[in-house]
Amino acid sequence: DVRVVEQGDSAAIEKKIRALRPFHPEARLIIEGGINRPPLERAMSRDLYRMAKQLAAEMGMTLEEASTGGGSDGNLTAALGIPTLDGLGGVGGGAHARDEHVVIHELARRAALIAALMARL
């Protein structure tokens, strides 16, 4: 599993992976697949993030920028040149784990933020 921060890094990383060779003479190394998600590059969405952060502040909320190194459908829209923010949904924790949860009292505030952002656009 390989993730890149900038699309320009994809070819070089893939070339390095495909050049790997096993150390043990009896070992085999089979490399399949390739990078199948473009990165959600920050530059693409910088202005949209600033707008969302300002709206959040006006609503008494703090909106922090983060990067998880994961992939989402947002990676695909950003690669098409569409400013994209990911992670504006529910506030919670434990993503994809047994303790995954959402903080219910934050849902209305997040919905209001998304509505305000859409109205501003």
Image (spheres, rainbow, N blue to C red):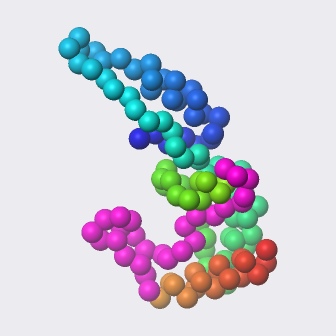
Instruction: Measuring from the top left, give residue 98's x and y in whole percent.
Output: 27, 69
Instruction: Measuring from the top left, give residue 43's x and y in whole percent.
Output: 71, 50
Which region shows up in magenta? 79-104
Vertical placement of residue 5 versus 73, above or below? above
Q: In this view, does 79 lie to the left or right of 4?
A: right
Q: Does the magenta stretch include residue 98?
A: yes
Instruction: Measuring from the top left, give residue 29's x and y in whole percent.
Output: 31, 23
* Residue found 66% across the figure and 61% down from its top: 84
Question: Which quarter of the rendering shows the N terminus?
Answer: top left
Number of marks drawn:
0
Does the rendering let one see residue 42?
no
* Residue found 46% across the figure and 39% down from its top: 2
* Residue found 68% across the figure and 83% down from its top: 115
Q: Is residue 121 magenta?
A: no
Q: Is residue 114 left or right of residue 69?
A: right
Vertical placement of residue 48 versus 91, above or below? above
Does the rendering let one see residue 80?
yes
